[in-house]
Image (cartoon, rainbow, N blue to C red):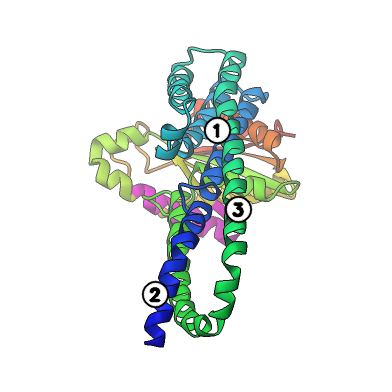
Amino acid sequence: MSFLGLMVLIVYESRWVYPEIQAYFSQTGSLTGQQLATRSRVYLQNAQTELLTEQPEVEAFDASIAQIEIAYGLFDVHVYRRQYECTEPSLRDLNQLMERLEQRGIGRIDALSELFAPIQCLTHIEMSQLDRRGQAINDFSESTRQHNQVLTYSSLLIFVLGLAFWWLHERQLRRTDHATQQTFEWMQRAMRDPLTGIGNRSALHQDVMANQHHSLGLILIDIDFFKQYNDAVGHPQGDALLRQLAELIAHTLKDEAMLYRLGGDEFAALIDCPDSNTLGSYCRELIQGLHGANFPHPAHPDKKGVTLSVGGTCFIAGEKAFSLAYEAADKALYQVKTAGRDGWQVTEDAK
């Protein structure tokens, strides 16, 4: 009967405790909502930064579109649509802006200006969420003060029940850890190319930023006449060739390089680069390694097996330096293709 009486007391007291806890910790309260609004605003500001960079307009637009798409996903939350009038117009503006950026139908300055209204809306949401959080805390503190005496007298018995709640809490923590691990694994997969298992373009950029101020070599690798290969043997065989080449490149450069597939038939590698001669030796080994593998190419115009065009450059890792290095390596790759393909070239243009 004492236990039953305690349970009745706890149920009664929960009538005032639960709403405040719910208001403070639930997703419809301030904590999670504020984080989403803040993250969305940061991505929009990153998009403005991309538009202000000195990189070519196409690359700046693509980078800003990527930032806006992430911000849109974080912004497009039911509670924001329901509680804030500026949400719907801001989402429409972002959607229209992405379409205009994709069609190259807007200038950098105009695109940058159109982001101010959504950013202002997100700032308003952040401030409103902070106010809601403060009000929830104040209400909770006042209710706690009023009921503190009742709970103090029953604290000893509640401690016993607390052991059971602690066990439930530990179980929930394990579930949360499992969910966090799944999210981390998903993020890792999002940075990998699903066909070859190596990094993708986002992983390349992330790795460059993680090695800022280090001397790196960027190698761009393109499969010669890959479209003709696919037309001759079919796309499944073409996918198999991409996987084989990824393994060949990894084997040739060993553990010293980080590999990426940039899309289609283009690969990239990041490697420590003390000087251009060292980078050139890696490029030469790639070409020689492919010749040794002798992959057949039934539709090669020059009656050869599968061949590669390789361009590379050394640079000091950084946002702007990477953009210049990519452009320089791509130019070197283009010169190899112009000269007849099946070769390599290292340029100093990025320095």
Mark 2 lies on residue? 8
Q: Which residue is at 69% across, 33% downward? A: 320
Quick check: 322 above or below 180? above
Q: Which residue is at 43% across, 25% downward? A: 88
Cβ atoms under marks 1 and 2 closer than 8 Å: no
Which amino acid is tagged 3?
Ile
Q: Which of 46 and 63 is in front in this view?
A: 46
Disc assigned to residue 302: none
Q: Which residue is at 68% across, 47% downward? A: 216
- Secondary element under disc 2, as helix, strand or loop, is helix
Boundaries of the magenta span: 241-258
Q: Where is residue 230 in the image (x, y as percent from the top left)?
A: 28, 38
In space, the residues marked 1 and 3 are separated at their CA atoms by 61 Å
- Secondary element under disc 1, as helix, strand or loop, is helix
Which amino acid is tagged 1?
Leu
Disc assigned to residue 333: 1
Quick check: 314 above or below 330? below
Q: Position of residue 63 (x, y in %)?
A: 55, 31
In space, the residues marked 3 and 2 are separated at their CA atoms by 26 Å
**Residue 131 visible in the snapshot:** yes
Looking at the rendered image, the quarter that the N terminus falls into is: bottom left
Mark 3 lies on residue? 137
Q: Which of 301 and 190 is in front in this view?
A: 190
Q: Which of 62 and 329 is in front in this view?
A: 62
Q: Residues within 10 Å of mark 3 (few under 14, many from 20)?
A: some
In space, the residues marked 1 and 2 are separated at their CA atoms by 77 Å
- Using residue 125 as the reference point, say whether residue 98 is left or right of it: left
Q: Which of 271 and 45 is in front in this view?
A: 45
Which amino acid is tagged 2?
Val
Quick check: 108 above or below 185? above
